[in-house]
Amino acid sequence: MRRYGAQRRVVAVAWGALFGAGALFQVGSAWAGPLVSTGAFRWAKSPLVRTMRAQDNGTVLGKTVSYMDPVARVVVIVSQPEFPFPQFKVDHVTNPTLEFLAGATVKFTFINRVMGFSHSFEITKTPPPYPMFPKVQPPLAGTALSPPPKSDESAYAQFTWHPAAGHYYYICAIPGHAEMGMYGEIIVK
Ligand SMILES: [Cu+2]
């Protein structure tokens, strides 16, 4: 695990808070580059979140979550501010490698449960490491920036991706998040 100085962490946290507020007022996306927003965010209370989570049809194999059905239903959650910074969770695996079949219909549900913070879920061919301000290139699919969740409701968005065979990555495009490890791999075969 990489180590980060306290100052750098404070800067990243400040950026996260700033962009959380920015997204609330619809001004945050200018920083995030050419994101593909394929689904508007909506609001879900806990029972709906549980229902959506139950629809994930992946199989966990260590750090990989594998979807070998022609219709893959992937539920990606950011659940809490974990040290050193928020991470993606799929089927309780942190930043897993996701496996799909080429030509599958991949239905993503991205759920942000972290009060006061925006996040995004973007798919790119650009491998890590990522800079403080990651450019999502090429923009393949994703959610753009989520609004920060409300007191008893999570923000969520859904979109569909039809991947060709290859190697991809998913990242959070909020400044500093991918830089500090908020990303994972996608293998399509
Ligand atoms: Cu994030």
Image (cartoon, rainbow, N blue to C red):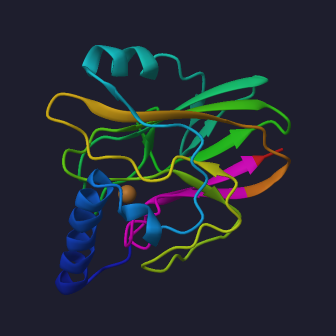
In the image, residue 179 above or below residue 5: above
Residue 109 seen in render: no
Residue 169: say if magenta. yes
Looking at the image, is 86 positioned above or below residue 131?
above
Residue 103: where, in percent of width, then height? 85, 35
Q: Nearer the viewer, residue 66 or 116?
A: 116
- Which quarter of the picture shows residue 170? bottom right
Left/right placement of residue 31 relative to residue 147 reads right
- Report whether 18 appears left or right of 118: left
- The residue range painted magenta reads 168-187
Front position in the image: 42 or 60: 42
Taking 88 as reference, is 4 left or right?
Answer: left
Image location of residue 140, percent across then percent down = 70, 54
Q: Quadrant of ligand 1?
A: bottom left
Which quarter of the rendering shows the C terminus?
Answer: top right
Q: Is residue 133 above or below residue 146?
A: below
Q: Position of residue 36 (x, y in %)?
A: 61, 53
Please determine whether, in this image, residue 127 is positioned above or below residue 78: below
Quarter holding the N terminus? bottom left
Would residue 47 be counted in the magenta stretch? no
Image coords of residue 153 (percent x, y): 24, 29
Hey, which quadrant is residue 115 in on the image?
top left
